[in-house]
Image (spheres, rainbow, N blue to C red):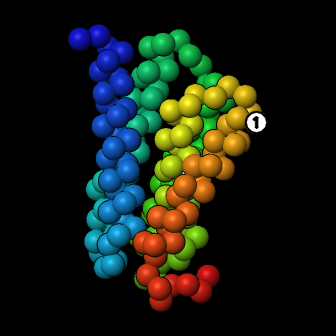
Amino acid sequence: MSAWIIWRLLKFIGATVLAGGVTATLIRTDRRGRMLAAQWLATPGWLLTWIAGYGLMKFTGRSYEPWILAAMLTSLISLHGTILYAQLAQPRRLSAVLASGGLFAAVATMVTRSTSVLELALVTVIGFAAGLPFAWLSTPAASTSE
């Protein structure tokens, strides 16, 4: 098995664990459960995704292309939103939008690998828009005031 396949598999596993952590954080109703999901799923998934992405970048000889930077930024936004959502006693919809929208946008940029800044902006906006319904439905009704 080549190193390229191993790096891709590790990145897929990391992205899957990150997505599971974000989802588990957003659907848990208790603060302790949200914190556990954010700390033990989302954060390690994010870290593995970044490490594997760096390995792929070095293995393929690609440097920091625009889509790589966009995926890094949106995944960081997703992790930040997930941690905010987990820590708050009354989670806010804005944190949920950052968590789910950032995740959708990161995956969209990694899948499309757009090189044009305009295309990347469009993919990112579409990713955040795709995350909005999930964020809206996952946030408890008591936290509608922001």
Q: Quadrant of residue 15?
A: top left
In the picture of the structure, the residue carrying the numbered disc 1 is 118
Q: Position of residue 21 (x, y in %)?
A: 34, 56
Question: SS at mark 1?
Answer: helix
In this view of the protein, which residue sits in the foreground, 53 or 102? 102
Residue 60, x across and y down, in percent:
48, 13
Residue 38 lies left or right of residue 111; in this view the side is: left
The amino acid beneath tag 1 is Leu
Q: Is residue 40 left or right of residue 100?
A: left
The residue depicted at 42 percent of the width and 22 percent of the height is: 55
Q: Residue pushed farthest left?
A: 1
Residue shown at 28%/56% (left/top)? 40
Q: Is residue 5 above or below residue 37?
A: above
Residue 3 image position (x, y, % from top left): 32, 14
The residue at 40%/37% (across/down) is 49
Percent x, y for residue 61? 53, 12
- 22 vs 131, nearest the viewer: 131
Task: Name the quadrant of the C terminus.
Answer: bottom right
Q: Is residue 43 above or below residue 29?
A: above
